[in-house]
Amino acid sequence: MKLWEKGINPEPAIIEFTAGKDRKTDLALTKWDIIGSMAHVIMLEDVGLVSEDEKNGLLKALHSLFVWDEEGSLVIENDVEDIHSQIEKEMSSILGTTGKKIHTGRSRNDQVLVDIRLYTREEIDKLSVLIRNLFTRLQSLSEQYKEVLVPGYTHMQPAMVSSFGLWFGAYAECLADDVLLLTGARALNNQNPLGTAAGYGTTLPINRKLTSELLEFDDLLYNSAYASLSRGKIEMAIASALASVAQTLSRFSMDVCLYMTSEFRFIDFPDEYITGSSIMPQKRNPDVFELIRARANVLQTLPNQIAILTTNLPSGYNRDLQLLKQLIFDAFGEMRECIEIMLLMLNNIKIKKNITENPLYNSIFSTEEVNRLVKQGIPFRDAYKAVSEMVRNSTFSKTSLSDYVHEGSIGNLCNKEIAEIFENRMKSFKNKTAAELADKMMHHVTPPNSTNGGL
Ligand code: ARG
């Protein structure tokens, strides 16, 4: 069954190739396709394109499909191209002629646009919860180990005194900025493309503002041709935000791999959380963090993949865009798995104490010594030269740690301030679940008594 069949039997190989992975990929969109259709039906009745009875019947049939999908019984059949076609087929078999009215004033092009936006909106919201868990864990580790010193590096050379408080807290603040990018992508995403049809609108008197309100979009995407163009642009914005989170995960994982080496030995994990070698009995390998690093690095290529897929595409719908779905849907799954396993590891991390007692790290106190002289009134450059001389002659020996008082230093981490910024940004992730939206749509079914008899 093809929605566009006109009496000529399409060549099966062509159908298989063009449907591609859609029969599987589109299942992630099923509930959103149904909810988008519910909003569309309510609007069609409001503007007089379907009757009240027809609206009631259509909404009830759509709701039964929603329930089937929740039970896992709704599938895309082999001779059906995609989820939009499957839903229309189901509606026609439940309601006959009335079911065929569901596509009035829309195209699969705006349907898929709205489905993807509703899907990604929920995925972003769900991801934000996981990011908050990771943020909270990093901040609590930062507080727990704020007194434990560790060398800070520049150029991979021991540089200055740092602490585990500063290290964990740095990645927490990193996530706070990633979340800001995610709120930006979410705001771009939360505009309604429904009603732009194939990309050039419709002569039917549809009410696009109504569907925007029903689906709880912030506003509508006005220009019909831009709605088509926005496919790829939205994915790019989301991918860039995901890539930023991925960068945070990847760099943290690299630090962990380095700090676990026998040369560093700053941190460790219980034996149950690390892996070994089939030949070298002594090996304790950080495979989990190596794989997070690799998977997060692949996630960082996502904006590039999207850029290349959409480069030189003319305006209007092009089938190339179909492949964007798989890329972006998979990315959410990858991200979720990486964060979940990282949380498990961080719940079991072991921190080594007294690292900076090792004479190897003597020199990281030299800048402290320069500052001590500066506080006594010696010009900075003279103090620097005097201490350099001591370091060169190996006469410099570690002094006690001075106070760090300014914001963001090891003595004043400002984790509370960072948490406040983070929580403020988190306020953007707040839409209803699919089930809540479906319930809300069902309130538009009018009770039998108030209609002229119902179906
Ligand atoms: N599977 C298609 C996609 O994801 C749905 C839209 C089909 N539109 C069309 N004009 N062939 O892009």
Image (tube, rainbow, N blue to C red):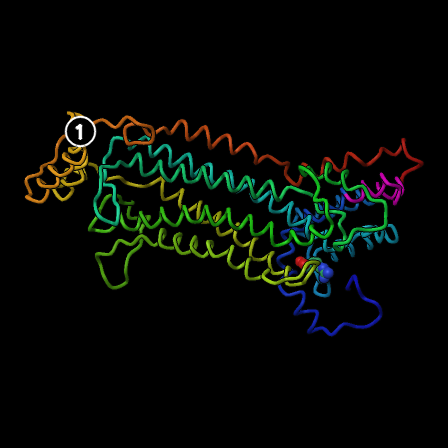
In front: 95, or 15? 15
Residue at image coords 40%, 36%? 173
* Residue 214 coordinates in the image, percent (x, y): 73, 37
Above or below, 357 against 224 in this view is above
In the image, is 241 to the left or to the right of 271? right
Residue at image coords 19%, 36%? 367
Q: Does 42 appear in magenta? A: yes
In front: 383, or 39? 383
In front: 239, or 103? 239
Total numbered labels: 1
Q: Does 166 appear in magenta? A: no
Quadrant of residue 36 within the rendered picture: top right
* Residue 443 coordinates in the image, percent (x, y): 77, 34
In the image, is 414 to the left or to the right of 114? left
Above or below, 148 against 19 in this view is above
Q: Residue furthest right?
A: 452
Residue at image coords 42%, 55%? 297
Q: Locate the C terminus by quadrant.
A: top right
Q: Quadrant of ligand 1?
A: bottom right
Q: Locate the N terminus by quadrant.
A: bottom right
Above or below, 383 against 193 in this view is above
Mark 1 residue type: Val
**Which span is picked out in magenta?**
40-57
* Residue 118 coordinates in the image, percent (x, y): 65, 45
Residue at image coords 75%, 55%? 198
* Residue 199 coordinates in the image, percent (x, y): 74, 54
Q: Main secondary structure of the magenta part?
A: helix
Quadrant of residue 269 within the rendered picture: top left
Q: Which residue is mark 1?
A: 374
In front: 198, or 257? 198
> Mark 1: which secondary structure?
helix
